[in-house]
Image: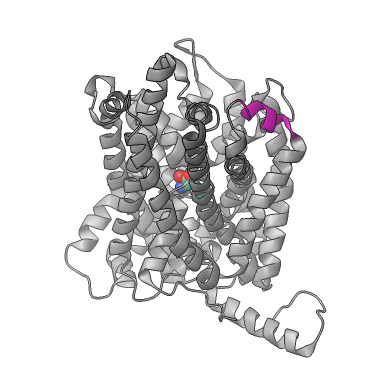
Amino acid sequence: MEKKKTSFGTSIGFELAAAGSAVGLGNLWGFPYKTSANGGAAYLFMYLACILLVGAAAMLAEFIIGRRARANPVTAYKEISKNCGWFGLAVVVIPALIMCYYFVLGGYTVKYSLNSFAGNAGMFQRFAGNAGDVILHTAVFALLALAIVVAGVRGGIEKTSKILMPTMLVILVVIISFSLLLGEGVSEGLAFYLRPDFSAMSWSGALSAMGQAFFSLSLGCGAMICYGSYSGKKVNLFRSTAVICVLDSLLTFMVGLAIFPALFHYAAVSGVSTAELGMGGMGLMFITLPMVFEDMSVVGSTLSLLFFAMAAIAALTSVISILEVVTQFVIQKFRIFRTRAALLVTGICVALSVPVGLSFGAAMNGGSLMALFGRNLLEVLDMITNTILMPVCALFACLAVGWIIGPREAVKAISPERDGKAHRLLGLMLKVVTPLLIIVIEIFGIFDLIMPLDNGVRRFSADGCGIVVCAYGILLVCAVVYFAFLKNSDTGNNSDELQVDALEAERVKAGPSRGWYRPE
Ligand code: PHE
């Protein structure tokens, strides 16, 4: 068996893994519907500008934090300053929370791809309300992620990313080709997507583009710190950041090319107006697109299979990055073997994702089950992580690198041969520009929760307030736990994993297991 290593073997392997984390369900459903609401290509321009202004620098900051320490996020933040370690704990807790709903959504993509030839139109409510089926598919999806993470960074994550990312690109090209050949409605779809309507641009559109760019790059949840810690010494993180941002933007752009012509074609032949199609939110992916596919008989079933298989791949390459963050911490802090750590983490998150899936399913059928703050659990978790906690943690990553480590030191840590202007530009971005923009995202996100628009008027919402308090409460708990239990204890690093591996190998040689392993 190939020896497991706690680092990526090649630059391209690292870049594809990080791009795999970035390209996820957010690109497939979030981007198209936000584009349609905000002036087509005009939104695309804003999105690309945000990737450049907010995303790239924040991603580089997270890579720097990981690479410098070659350790899990808690140790990595501790190395910046002992009092900062609790942010590391927060970025281990956030991915665990994300997993609890990403597993569920991944399960949906598995179900939809397997069911493509039987027809997915009208299936959403039925499937969402079928507890057994939801749990089964959630578990299947989680097991796939588990298998990859158990195989290790190089043998699992890197290898699968190297296969799955190009596969995804090929599938997308095939879908685009089909989509462009549909005939009626295609040119209208392309015009809608590619001709910028600057009059539809607004402040809220710009903010939504910022949030989208941010979520899409998987920032503020430890994924890039963790992957950065596994990047080999030879990896040029400046170049890699550029490659990952370009790949993510390219795939996002291509998703639009695949979806809009198909939607407009359906509208043209079915006589339903595009306004009535329901391009908003998750409905676009799980309700509208299946309807579009079903209308094209066998070609449609094939397209459906391709599309949902691609969605499943996108979700899988994203979820392994967050499963790895938590697994890495558990291995290094508790000195337990990778298989056990990954099993433990996956098991707990799957168990927690059951109520999330049921609550979401009930809501989609008009009911309410285990609802919190007037929303289903999936929505609540999404808001806590995506809207509130991830920007805070990414902000802190930028500030820590910009103000505490210092841009000159940071650049030296990742590429000693680089000096001159690189650190000045990075300093300006990390100290001022990116933090200010992230603060705007955070404040707007919170404002929208506390004072949501209700029939065109902003009204105070106690439920929204509850979500904000809950999110900041989680940060507070992380701080308390950190200062009580982790600040002065050893939280391990990547080379400890090799030690744990060596001990495990000895144990296998010696005979049957006698429990968890803790090297002294
Ligand atoms: N980037 C992923 C997407 O666009 C979402 C994600 C966020 C995945 C954070 C992992 C961590 O869907």
Task: Please state if 330 lies on the left or on the right of 74 as rendered.
Answer: right
> For residue 356, what is the image quadrant?
top right
Q: Is residue 462 visible?
A: yes
Q: Is residue 81 visible?
A: no
Residue 68 against residue 52 in the figure, above or below: below
Instruction: State the residue lying farthest toward the front.
Output: 298
> For residue 338, what is the image quadrant?
bottom right
Q: Was residue 123 drawn as part of the magenta stretch in this picture? A: yes
Residue 467: x and y, percent? Answer: 60, 32
Tell me the residue at 62%/39% (across/down).
Answer: 115
Majority secondary structure in the magenta region:
helix
Tell me the residue at 36%/52% (across/down).
Answer: 58
Task: Please state if 385 lies on the left or on the right of 371 as rendered.
Answer: left
Instruction: State the residue lying farthest toward the left.
Output: 420
Q: Which range is magenta?
A: 122-130
Residue 188: x and y, percent? Answer: 28, 23
> For residue 418, what is the image quadrant?
bottom left
Q: Nearer the viewer, residue 301 or 60?
A: 301
Tell me the residue at 32%/31% (across/down).
Answer: 206
Tell me the residue at 62%/57% (across/down).
Answer: 144
